[in-house]
Amino acid sequence: LASYFDLHSEIDNYAWGGATVNNSYIPSYSSYLEGPVPGVIDQVSTYISEIGDDSIANTLHVLWIGYNDYWWYAYDNITDSDDEIVSLSPVYQNVTQSIKNIMESLYSAGARKFMVGNVPNMTQMPEALSRSEKIHQSYDILVNGHNEKLSTILTNFGATNPDTNIYSFDAFNALQCIDFQKKFLGFLNVQDACYPSPDAPCSNIFSFKFWDNYHFTTHSHNVIAGTAIQS
């Protein structure tokens, strides 16, 4: 965002690949590092301990979390042998409440500007193509519940703290838009991973929505960034 608006601002990135929001609830894990990584709560605690009080009020704090939580939860807890889908409401309630707690911690430290994204449609990720219908149903429940609850949390947070600026960017619909307007946006493949494995060639990556089975291409992130800017 800073480069788009030609703002020569310092950008601090405290994110870790593979992180979940709260390691005490759903543990984080990086397949690249082959080990645990700090959850978002830990990342924010580190940030608050390092940031100066003078700049925090004018800093835009970007939070985009949830996919890893729900992927790992489904991986560890949902199997096709189960007769029915267990109640998943406590899962997305816990994750979204943790996001609220993070925002409150940042607010108490002086933060007043927030940008928060919702979770994309997980059933459309390449990794989901080979998953069962039960996993797809679980993804839908988790993502839809998360996004609905998050929207309410952000609205109430802004009402409770009127001195804040809260920008909510809709990553779910931005990525759905790629499917509906793929030719207009320059995408030729919105289903498969361009780079599904280390020994698979990846050509014309700009035309793909997905880089690998779990991540979007830079082209897709550009669409997401456009949605964030519009927010």
Image: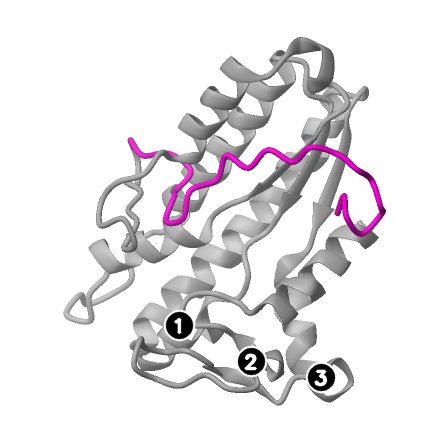
Q: Is residue 190 left or right of residue 9?
A: left
Q: Nearer the viewer, residue 196 or 161?
A: 196
Neighbourhood count class around disc 3 (C-alpha, 10 Å): few under 14, some 14–19, many 20 upward? some
Indicate which disc, 3 or 1, sits on the residue closer to the N terminus. 3
Amino acid type of the residue tagged 3 in the rendering: Gly
Give the x, y percent position of residue 143: 49, 57
Check whether the beta carbons of the residues at disc 3 and disc 1 lie within 8 A of each other: no
Identify the magenta region: 1-24
Q: How many marks?
A: 3
* Residue 215 vertical placement versus 35 (above, below): below
Identity of the residue drawn at 42% across and 77% down: 126
Indicate which disc, 2 or 1, sits on the residue closer to the N terminus. 2
When asked about the image quadrant of residue 226, the answer is bottom right
Identity of the residue drawn at 32% across and 69% down: 135
Q: Secondary structure at mark 2?
A: helix
Identity of the residue drawn at 50% across and 39% down: 96
Q: Residue furthest top?
A: 53
Q: Nearer the viewer, residue 100 or 149?
A: 100
Give the x, y percent position of residue 214: 41, 66
Magenta span has 3?
A: yes
* Residue 150 vertical placement versus 97 (above, below): below
Residue corresponding to mark 2: 205
Q: Is residue 189 left or right of residue 79?
A: right
Identity of the residue drawn at 71% across and 57% down: 225
- Point out the frontmost of discs 2 and 1: 2
Residue corresponding to mark 1: 213
Specify the principal SS of the magenta part.
Answer: loop
Residue corresponding to mark 3: 186
